Amino acid sequence: MSRAFTPKVVTANSLLEGDAVWLTEDDRWTKVMAEAELIEDEAHAQIRLLDAQARAGEVVGPYLADAREGENGPEPVHFREEFRTRGPSNYAHGKQVERA
Amino acid sequence: MYQYSDFDEAFVRTRVAQFRGQVERRIDGSLTEDEFKPLRLMNGLYLQLHAYMLRVAIPYGTLNARQMRQLAMIAERWDKGYGHFTTRQNIQYNWPELRHVPDILDALADVEMHAIQTSGNTIRNVTADHFAGAAADEIDDPRPYAELLRQWSTDHPEFQFLPRKFKIAVTGAEHDRAVTRAHDIGLRMVRRGGETGFEVIVGGGLGRTPMIGKVLRDFLPVEDLLPYCEAIVSVWNLLGRRDNKYKARIKITVHEHGVDEISRLVEERFETVKAAFDGTAMDLLEGIRAQFAPPALPPRGTGAYDAARDADPVFRAWADTNLTPHRAAGHAIVSISLKKHGATPGDASAEQMRVIAELAERYGHDEIRISHEQNVILPHVALDDLPQVHAALKAADLATANIGLVSDIIACPGMDYCALATARSIPIAQEIAERFEALKIEHEVGPLKIKISGCINACGHHHVGHIGILGLDRGGVETYQITLGGSGAEDATIGEKTGRGFGAEEITGAIERIVFAYLDLRQGREETFLDAYRRVGAAPFKAALYAADEDAKKDRADAA
Ligand code: SF4
């Protein structure tokens, strides 16, 4: 029996600033994970990753990260991905202040 | 301190111009990331979790005031107002934008600094004893040799694509403050008869497979330093396991082939390469040495110092903890703690950097050092100037009296910044320091080195911490594994794992139990934590750590 596919988002770092970005359904790179496209189908995930890899002028190192449906959109599953939505814990720097 | 020659200046400027072109070509799409990545790494530019990170070399940890001010300027202009000093005596900026990096490198070049070979499979920044040139137990200042090694290894055509990175540390003192036994090559200055030379240690390293280095030569004459190092690196360059990045470091090569075989190959190679070194390097060394001439330290009284000690208990506590004897009477080596309780280990704000620069200029003969323990050193300060120095440090939040104590924790950036991390280190260090500050017992506990790494790469040197903490990802949860009894000094030892790891919310309590167990069993204040551990072994500490587990096991057994 094949294991159920864990939903994914496509994520990367932006080329110029280096911060975390996510791919939206309408092909934008967003700084807000909740706006990302939540991908529930494995084959589609691979295609979206290929799409992302073709945009090497905008981002670096795209990959598929596990995600789940949250109240406002996709949410991280793993703590590393959660930190990427927020920034470091020792200073109020990065996304946690950009969003405020 | 060393002054760039015209050659150095031209070399660094050319590299900046080259990198500027590379960045432009990456942005306009003419270079792919695969093409650009090795180029940016050669210039110290990483891509981390939230941003790029620029690692700037501080050769053998030595800076002057002008350089420190420039580091402050860079932090303010292109970063978020601070920098992070690392266990390799470097500084890292956590937030530069790609477009600005060439400007930052130009600003560094203005003060004879750069980021070359701070990454990649090359010979990295050569580190040295942070008390070099001042310590009372020193045979000779190791920095001229470190500078010679830097010149030899920078852009060395044979060593730009090594099997893996390569790290060299040098000390000129008896007491090893440079962790020489955990480096690819460790050089310890020794005397034989009237001659000064090096004990050459090879194949030490931490990371996934921690190893204590082995002595390859017990006495290497100074004039053989470069050809011998060249022989070592070139033997490893051929033998090193390029098939497996986890087995590529020289420690594994030495382990797989045995130190005797490596020694045979190195000696053989040494005979060949020696001929190419015609003595030019020794002439160069003389010139370099002159630039490291110690400052004149005329005798001074100690009246003001003694009076401050008597009058001010805060000053006295700081002096007792943060000063080290200087070889010149009436002077001291000042360690400035970047470990204020609750602060990020190794971070300094631009403002703090400026205060340190000012103090170095006014009271410290324009000399600053960065220690691998992530603190800042003023190596030559007159005792009578210390009350003023202390007051200025206090006003800048830099007067924490905790050098060598529980809260003087080494912590790598961990998962707050580092893309390789498996867990966070900084919040753990902050919490432990705050806990012991609240308990008010760290002076009572005495010397105790805690070192934390956020992954198996061990940038936080956890293996050689008296107490080491390694952050891991266990099933999607940050988990911390403890090692005990490690040492990075001349009696270098790899710490032993205690048993199961602890969750983030348990780890501070676990460390507290270890420290209280030590206080209970030590034979007096003179018996340090490490001495006590060596006397009694791990058992009492494990009992303290896992008592609750044992109780639970018993309860389960009783219930069954
Ligand atoms: S030890 Fe690991 S987490 Fe810490 S800085 Fe090194 S690579 Fe990053």
Image (spheres, coloured by chain):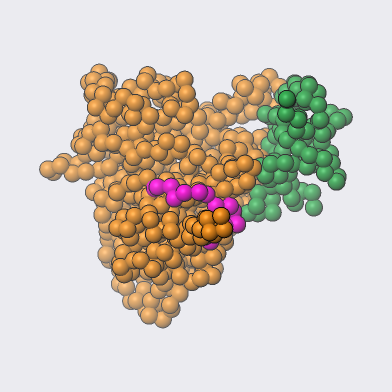
Q: Is residue B224 above or below residue B454?
A: above
Name the residue rendered at 52%, 68% in the picture. B437
The color chain A is rendered in:
green
For residue B312, side relative to residue B14 (left or right):
left
Q: Is residue B333 above or below residue B219?
A: below
Q: Residue at x 25, y 33 (%)?
A: B216
Q: Quadrant of residue B303?
A: bottom left
| Residue found 75% across the figure and 33% down from its top | A6
Q: Name the image quarter holding residue B22.
A: top right
Query: Does the image show residue B105?
Result: yes
Q: Is residue B434 above or below residue B312?
A: above
In the rendered structure, the answer to whether residue B491 lies left or right of residue A4 reads left
Left or right: B402 with respect to A55?
left
The residue shown at (29%, 27%) is B258
What's the colour of chain B in the image? Answer: orange
Q: Nearer the viewer, residue B139 or B538?
A: B538
- Residue B54 pos. (x, y %): 57, 39
User: Where does residue B458 sit, x and y in percent of width and height?
Assistant: 47, 42
Residue B508 inside the magenta-drawn segment: yes
- In the image, the segment drawn in magenta is B495-511
- Asked whether residue B113 is in view, the answer is no
